[in-house]
Image (cartoon, rainbow, N blue to C red):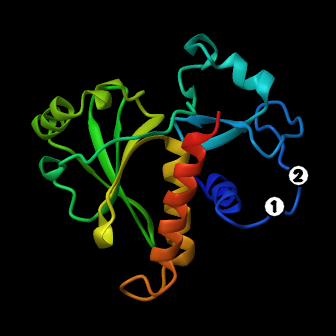
Amino acid sequence: MSSGALERVLRGAGRAPLLAERCDVCGAPLPERHRHLLDTERADVMCACRPCALLFVRDVASLGHYRLVPERRLRLGAVATDELGVPVGLAYVVRGADGAVVAHYPSPLGSTRWEVDPAGWAAVVARRPELAGLAPEVEAFLVNTARGARHHWIVPIDDCFRLVAVVRREWRGLSGGSRVWPAVEEFFAELEHREEEP
C-alpha cells in the first residue's frame, strides 16, 4: 500500500482529517461515506465520489487496473482454516485476478503475505461455498481467531487496509502492548455494526 493510501486509511481508522477529502478521480469534495477504487498496479486505495464510482461499475472504464471496491460485508459461521497455513490468528485472504490466492496478516510493519496452497484453499471453499464468489483483488476472507475470538467475514479490501493501519498505529513493543488488541476488537465491533447498515 502506498504512503498516500496508508495516510487516508489511518484517517479512517481514527485520525481526524486535516482537510476535507476530495475525489481522487475528479477532485470533487466527498461526503464522509463514499466509495473506493483499488489501483491494482500500485495496491493503492483511491477515494471516489458517486459519479466517478458509477463510471467503474463496469470494468470497461477501469483502464485495466482500477477496480471498484464492493461494499458487501458478510459474517460467516465458524470456518476451519488449518489448510490455509495461517501462522497467526488475524489474517485475510485475497484471490488474485490470475486465480492465485494470497494470505496477508497485519503486523507493525504493514501487511506480511504468503501464497496459499491451492488445494488448501479449495478445501476451505468446499466447506464454505460463499468464498468461491470472492471478487478478485477487491474482496477478502477476513479471519480473527486471536485470543479466543471467532470472526470469519467476507469484506471489502479497504476494510483490510484499515485493519492493517489500526495494527500499525496501535502496536507497541514485541507483543503488541496493551492497546492493539482492544483496537482490533473495536474494529470487529464496528464491522458488525456496518454489516447491519442498509
Circle 2: residue type: Ala
Real-space Cα distance between discs 2 and 1?
7 Å
**Residue bearing the label numbered 1:** 17
The residue lying at 52 percent from left, 33 percent from top is 72
Q: Position of residue 127 (x, y in %)?
A: 17, 34
The residue lying at 50 percent from left, 42 percent from top is 157
Q: Position of residue 174 (x, y in %)?
A: 37, 87
Q: Can residue 43 be seen in the rendering of this structure?
A: no
Left or right: 196 in relation to 98: right
Q: Position of residue 52 (x, y in %)?
A: 76, 24
Looking at the rendering, in which quadrant would you find the C terminus? top right
Left or right: 88 in relation to 109: left
Circle 1: residue type: Pro
The residue lying at 88 percent from left, 57 percent from top is 19
Labelled pair 2, 1 in contact (Cβ < 8 Å): yes
197 lies above or below 61: below
27 lies above or below 169: above
118 lies above or below 78: above
Q: Residues within 10 Å of mark 1 (few under 14, many from 20)?
A: few
Q: Could you say whether the residue bearing mark 2 is in a helix, strand or loop?
A: loop
- Mark linked to residue 20: 2
Left or right: 154 in relation to 61: left
Q: Can residue 176 be seen in the rendering of this structure?
A: yes
Q: Position of residue 68 (x, y in %)?
A: 59, 27
Q: Residues within 10 Å of mark 2 (few under 14, many from 20)?
A: few
